[in-house]
Image: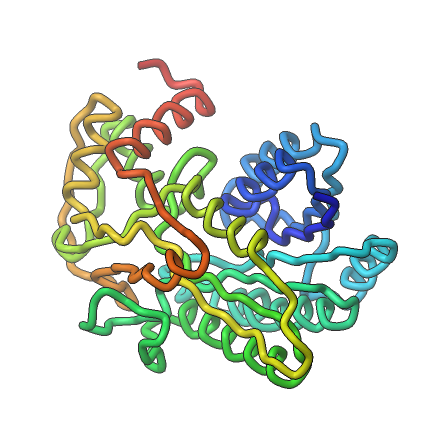
Amino acid sequence: MNRTIIVTGCAGFIGFSLAKQILKNHDRVIGVDCITDYYNPQLKLDRVKILQKDDQFKFLKLDLTSVTDMEKLTASVKDSKDLHLVHLAAQPGIRYCAQNPESYINNNLVGFFRIIEYARSVGVKHFIYASSSSIYGGTPKIPFHVNDQVDAPISLYAATKKSNELMAHVYSSVNGMATTGLRFFTVYGPWGRPDMSYYTFAEKIVRGEALAVFNEGNMYRDFTYIDDVVEGVLSVLDRFTPSLPGVQQYKLYNIGNSEPVHLMEFIRVLEESLGKKAVIDLKPAQPGEVLSTYADIELTRAELGFNPKTSIQEGLPKFVEWYRQYHKIDR
């Protein structure tokens, strides 16, 4: 293949994992990231170093909210013919909303507008972007289907992701741009985000510290292994065909394992993988926390051939193996 694929958030968990696989498939990757300090920047820099070993990878340290930086991105792809864009850069997290709400507005709304307008202006063939299972809010209907009503988000993060979907719809209908939104469900695995529960749980179990388990542990998550997520994104890239003139191409898909796991069972498997028992500190539910996520992936399977294969019994030991190696922790 001879595509050029821009991956924003390339220093992040999903962006790095996706870019690495795209390079293996012999496409060119332009990776964009501003390396924020939301979590340890060294982990992000280490991811980028791995990508830079491939001469088909070009890294641009840019802030998508900056008009000047967007001009630099435009200049970097001026000779690219078959141009696709996967927008994964965002301010993640639900609990962080209360500490820094402005970050969500700047990165997830202003940044999204800048990158989708950029995509329109340079003639990107396909604009793929990250949405989230959080937009389903507290709906009691499960499993979650992409056609469900999602007009009552319970966190600012979820509201920004719903806004992204609406903005993409406008660009598809008004400008004829092909857009695909991917609602990711609790992604985990090697090179993961240190702010995610499975990562912080591993750290605390290793240190012998108590795990803060909210809603008394009575939560279910559709934990989705990173390799399955990457497969889902690649299926969107690889099965893309330009829409006919005048035909709107606006798509949404769930990218989840479709097998919710009780949080306490997840902790049990993590304990087993680490070979150490956890100290559990049960706490009440947090505001904005979705208590159960469950992806209906029938549409994703039918249209993209998406078929997640990795259970937590297989995925968590792989994460733990990486975690021990990266942090130089003896068994």
Residue 254 location, quadrant:
bottom left
Q: In the picture provided, is 53 more to the left or to the right than 9? A: right
41 relative to 88, above or below: above
Q: In the picture provided, is 64 more to the left or to the right than 318? A: right
Give whichever of 238, 201 is nearer the camera. Answer: 238
Rendering coords of residue 98 (x, y %): 39, 66
Q: In the picture provided, is 116 more to the left or to the right than 200? A: right
Rendering coords of residue 298 (x, y %): 32, 61
Q: In the picture provided, is 294 more to the left or to the right than 57? A: left
Residue 148 location, quadrant:
bottom left
Give whichever of 137, 226 is nearer the camera. Answer: 226
Q: Residue at x 48, y 45 (%)?
A: 230
294 relative to 139, above or below: above
> Which quarter of the figure is the C terminus placed in?
top left
Give whichever of 55, 126 is nearer the camera. Answer: 126
Name the outermost residue toward the top: 330
Rendering coords of residue 275 (x, y %): 21, 21
Q: Residue at x 29, y 62 (%)?
A: 296
Residue 103 location, quadrant:
bottom right
Q: Residue at x 65, y 75 (%)?
A: 244
Rendering coords of residue 105 (x, y %): 54, 71
Labels in figure, total: 0
> Which quarter of the figure is the N terminus placed in?
top right
Q: Residue at x 61, y 68 (%)?
A: 112
17 relative to 277, above or below: below
